[in-house]
Image (cartoon, rainbow, N blue to C red):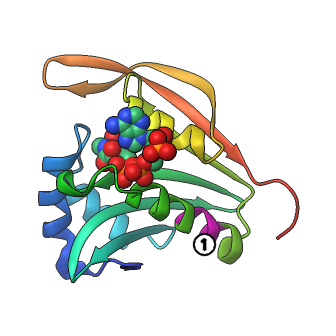
Amino acid sequence: MQIRCANSGELNTLVTLDKISNMTNWSLNDYQNSFNNKQHFIYILEEHGKISACIVVGVVLDEAEILQLWVESNSKRKGLGIYLLNYTLNEIRKKHMVLRVFLEVRDGNVEAINLYKKVGFIEVGRRHKYYNVDAWQFDALVMQKEFLGFL
Ligand SMILES: CC(C)(COP(=O)(O)OP(=O)(O)OC[C@H]1O[C@@H](n2cnc3c(N)ncnc32)[C@H](O)[C@@H]1OP(=O)(O)O)[C@@H](O)C(=O)NCCC(=O)NCCS
């Protein structure tokens, strides 16, 4: 298993895998925008040469935001999500001196909410009707994690 930054030739694959793994999936344009943004980082987790998971994080000064995270459908519930998330939190803390991390997650997305709570995120707000999925609207929970103490 290895984690590395995605390259431009992999963005189409990310779109395909995201679509089958994630209700609030991104378009090619979304991935391209993040790829071209110097403050965004797209990390992928590979197993036997195949992409199994992806996370996108944005960093501004000492704050970061988890913008996207998914584990490919057949690889869920094997510890890959928490592994990739912890790796990313470590990277942004060490390399970018991030002190605080935010994210938005669809209300009712128990898998993701449990995962984020498990690594220390707490709920700090709610955005009403933030997500449109097909004909449905969902609130977003805003979650935050603070890094305490020095490395
Ligand atoms: C959320 C997601 C990334 C979790 O990835 P994963 O690799 O399956 O999760 P892990 O195996 O690392 O599990 C870590 C923890 O997450 C929580 N979790 C994961 N799947 C869960 C499920 N089906 N039900 C309840 N809790 C779950 C648990 O707390 C779990 O710890 P545990 O195994 O000790 O109970 C994955 O379900 C996913 O891709 N979901 C669709 C995309 C998405 O919603 N992304 C979030 C965007 S904000």
For badge 1, the amino acid type reads Glu
Q: Position of residue 101 (x, y in %)?
A: 63, 50
Q: Position of residue 99 (x, y in %)?
A: 75, 57
Q: In which quarter of the image is the C terminus?
A: bottom right
Horizontally, is 74 left or right of 112 in the view?
A: left
Horizontally, is 13 left or right of 53 in the view?
A: left
**What's the residue at 24%, 79% (across, down)?**
8
Is residue 23 visible in the rendered image? The answer is yes
Tell me the quarter of the picture where residue 63 sits: bottom right
Tell me the quarter of the picture where residue 23 sits: top left
Q: In which quarter of the image is the N terminus?
A: bottom left
Count residues near mark 1 (Cα–Cα under 10 Å), then give few for <14, some for 14-19, many for 20+. few
Tell me the quarter of the picture where residue 62 sits: bottom right
Residue lying furthest right:
149
Q: Where is residue 3 in the image (x, y as percent from the top left)?
A: 41, 77
Q: Does the residue labelled 1 lie within 8 Å of ligand 1?
A: no
**What's the residue at 21%, 83% (across, down)?**
49
Horizontally, is 118 left or right of 56 in the view?
A: right
Residue under numbered circle 1 = 91
